Amino acid sequence: MSKKAKKDPFASRGRKARPSQMRPKVDPSLRALLEKYPAERSNLIPLLQVVQDQHGWLTEDSMAAIAEYLHVPSSIVYGVATFYAQFYMTPQGKHRVKVCQGTACHVRGSQAIMDQLSSKLGIPPGGTTSDLLFSLERVACFGSCALAPVMVLDGKVHGRVTIKKAEKIVEGVK
Amino acid sequence: MEEIKFTIDGQEVTAKPGQSVLEATLAAGIYIPNLCYDPKLEPYGGCRLCVVEIEGMRGLPTACTTKVTPGMKVRSETPEVHQVRKITMELLVADHPLECLTCSLNQRCDLQKAAAFLGVDQSRLRRSERALANDESNPFFVRDFKKCILCARCVRVCSEVRGLGAIDMAKRGYEAFISPFAGLPIADSICESCGECVDHCPTGALYVRGEAILPGKEVKTICPYCGVGCQMVLGIRQNRIVKVLGDLTYPVNSGSLCVKGRFGLDFASSEDRLKTPLIKKNGQLVEATWDEALDLVASRFKEIKKKHGGQAIAGLCSAKATNEENYLFQKFIRAGAGSPHIDHCARL
Amino acid sequence: MRFEQLQARAKKAWQEVVSPQIPLIRMGMATCGRAAGGQELLQAFQEELAKNKIQAQFSEVGCLGLCYAEPMAEIILPGRPGVLFAKLTPAKMKKIGEDYLVHGKIVGDSALAVMGPARNGTPAFTDLPMVKGQQRTALRNCGIIDPTNLDHYLAHDGYVGLKRALSLSPDEVIAEVKTSGLRGRGGAGFPTGQKWEFCRKATGTPKYLICNADEGDPGAFMDRSVLESDPHSVLEGMALAAYAIGAEHGYIYCRAEYPLALERLDLAIRQATEHNLLGDNILGSGFNLHLKIKMGAGAFVCGEETALMASIEGRRGMPRTRPPFPANQGLFGKPTTINNVETLANLPPILAKGGAWYAGFGTEKSKGTKTFALAGKVDRTGLIEVPMGITLKEIVFDIGGGSPIGKKIKAVQTGGPSGGCIPAELFDLPVDYERLAAVGSIMGSGGMVVLDENTCMVDVARYFLEFTKNESCGKCAPCRLGTRQMHEILTDICAGRGRPGDIELLEEIGAAVRKGSLCALGGTAPNPVLTTIQHYRHEYEQHIQDQRCFAGVCKALITYSINAETCNGCRVCATNCPQQAISGEKKKPHVIDTALCIKCGICYEMCKFDAVVRQ
């Protein structure tokens, strides 16, 4: 189909046509990544995961590319991506600080640890520092309850954390 | 087809095979509150207002998702059922702006109807309002997130009926909202503005711009735009079209319309609308009768054919005409004018 | 290789573990061991031994369940039973290297237990208070074998159950599981044999088997532990289940928060397939089974079976109404059985030893053993497996050792966000499905979080409602709005903004949400609120009427001050206060400026003289 036929019907209103309406210009490396998986709807979540793994977060373009690859409406890809807590629609920090908010961690004071890290990094839970160095996240439970409270920095689990220890762990990567 | 007999609150009701408890009960003229049920869509079971007690079934099943079986004993008016519905309704209302008088769905709102049926006490709950601004991007309708009850009828109609899927639910839980791709305004999505979602919205969360009036009378007619022949119900007031709805009972379109039929009828009362033929005389367009106009056209065609041959004439017919009219038109061009040059606009 | 040959090879391999030629050091390397610093410790120890030219070999094991004692290592010297060293630190490890590895001496109380009879004052492992009352079935191999070594699993009767099952008809396998009385360990407790029978009888092909490894309940970690420590036991269980229901395709839906479990599963599937224990024509029986791992993406509701299936299909994890049940219309609309990890891990011994053996444990309606994840304010945290019917008192005090700091135990929270709080007065309650439900809680997946007198029950309820509010999928109104409304009210109460009538309102909304919600998430979400109101109504009243939180948790209702008589002016509190709210001269009593204090509690934690008072 020519580009003209797909033109934004409301273009006169000064809006830019969005990826959802155009055939996305798919980056060849992304295309190669997608093509490792059969174009089946049941691969939607695995594709989102693998794309995020590679790029750190999900851009509009990459979601549109997945939609096109699987032949599902882009709104559905967006609906699925926003449903699950592990997909990010914004750039994430180089270092990911995750504080467990499980029951055992909660009764052993994880909230105070979260509060302290939050004020130390100057971002709310779920936020990313403006220098893109740190993201702070609450996670429901890592299943390491016996060592509560628990935090995870860049995939490494730290148990029996105290406010002081948490600060030290974060300072360790700075 | 064999009818199935069952009882609701002791009253015997008949259902058609395959009908849900809700459908059969509503068809019998008995109201069970409901918001996410829609006759054109698959049952959803989301609003939970149609919960009932059914003998032999655990808990409180929803009437919309339960098929009638012979001899089924349904109770819709027990204190327990009422309590669950009432609290659910109170929760919905605590999250809904209380501006019914100025809402375009006033008196046509399913939420209002169900709330009135259940009797809602508002004083004791913590009220909340979602912090999402209206989406005003579409020229025909407005999306008001504060009034959305997340019944997903719009989402479902867009994918189940229109096969488009321009919108879906985004995020989850209390944060959930209906959204096109990437949370963009609806005008920046693949939405075709058919307005079917607006039609199916049970509240004022989707409403047609400037359409806040109850029509004086309703007239059934066929959409003037194309040969499909969708039937529509026009709301008329002082001889102007103030509202357009698809006719749910008409087999051709079962209530669906496209953007033109639903939002494109304002030409009917436009100042610029041509109502009589105009003939250019001395450089000026002058009103004429149909006989005058047709005579002129016929005579000019004859002249051209005589002077340059039939092939000098070409015909372009319109999708606004029916198949039969189009047939006649090509016959006229080919046999009457003697020209092979016949084409069709092929789209509206 | 024939199965018997495999077994012979495995026995030999295991023999090398229990009687090694050179010292063998086995580190607990499940997530808990790693979180406690096991990896760094192992590395340091290896370097130390290399430096001193001490010969030793190393291997990893999973989790023994004694998580409180992590990091842990078992050292096996040639000709001796293994000795378990616990709560290791680099210094301790170094010393053990000298004392035990070189001289074969256990010095002081550095050793926790002997993996054999007691010796020189070091108790036998099986006599440890945390181990004594246990009956490990699902956890039978956890912490004992190297989870990456198929031979270790085979040497412990691995795949014997499957071998036997394949000689039986599927109906006979179902009958055996019915005899065992095994009920779903994921929470609802539906009889496993019956579930299989529904699916077996359902028409439609193909059929699917799903292993639910989306262990989302905060406070529960038995599935993680089994997957990390003994993945083949789950695979064998899946093969048994698939054979019984007639499925040739299976999915393991595992949450992404468990990277190690995912890694171990992936390896185990490859090993099993290589050895004809999975794949086509398993052990020459003609039965095929192909397994796929699906990684979750962070949604608690996907533990609900219809939501889980939606997620595998690539949709939003929103539950749908049942019926139709998955046994008839499940994954991709086909007959499907969904079993939880622990359920599956129980199956191999049931098939190997017979259903009657398993039914010998437990109570009348709840047969067998159940794992519990013991966490919270209890001394010996970890993972245990006990016969059903054991009392909460035995679990919390005999096994768990009560409070680590001598506080009064107030309650135990079972079943995570779907469960409730059971007060200490009811600790004589034997634990089984029916009795827990009778006191308003549920068995759930088996999380047990112990709460002491410094736990505020309103705060606990608020915590859980915040969780369910965030995890509600949003499809149905009572759950989406009801959890939010209850959370709002509880937050108000904790912040001193409670209103008269709030308790009754919570009860009313809770009852409606319980009955009106679409799925079990909403249906059980009010439980933490309703049980805490039931047993601790006075705490709610104290918060609302007296504006007090006696547990000292709700910030808005407490104040910190310094007792001038016990304060010796050490300045620790003042230097650690993030707000500089504490002033005072050195060696003189300090004062907290309540206007500046943000009630973070750091001073309270730091003070070694109990001079900081929380009221």
Image (cartoon, coloured by chain):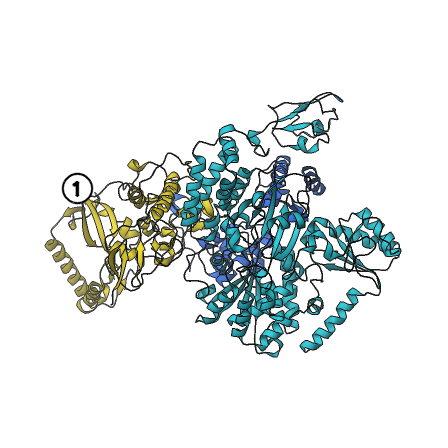
- Please report, as a chain letter, where disc 1 is located: B
Mark 1, Cα crowd under 10 Å, few <14 / some 14-19 / many 20+, is few
- Residue C222 drawn above or below residue C570: below
Q: Say which quarter of the image contains residue C102.
A: bottom right
**Of B263 and C130, which appears nearest the observer?**
C130
Q: Is residue C248 visible?
A: no
Q: State which quarter of the image contains the N terminus of chain C.
A: bottom right
Chain A, hue in figure: blue
- Residue A140 drawn above or below residue C263: above
Residue at the location (85% across, 54% down)? C100
Name the residue type under label 1.
Gln
Relative side of C369 to C316, left or right? right
Q: How many marks?
A: 1
Relative side of C578 to A27, left or right? right
- Residue A133 drawn above or below residue A48: above
Chain C, hue in figure: cyan
Residue at the location (38% across, 43% down)? B87
Relative side of C491 to C374, left or right? left
Q: Which residue is mark 1?
A: B238
**Of A168 and B178, which appears nearest the observer?**
A168
**Of C553 and B289, which appears nearest the observer?**
C553
* Chain represented in yellow: B
Q: State which quarter of the image contains the C terminus of chain C.
A: top right
Q: Position of residue C126 (x, y in %)?
A: 72, 57
Q: Position of residue C208 (x, y in %)?
A: 51, 67
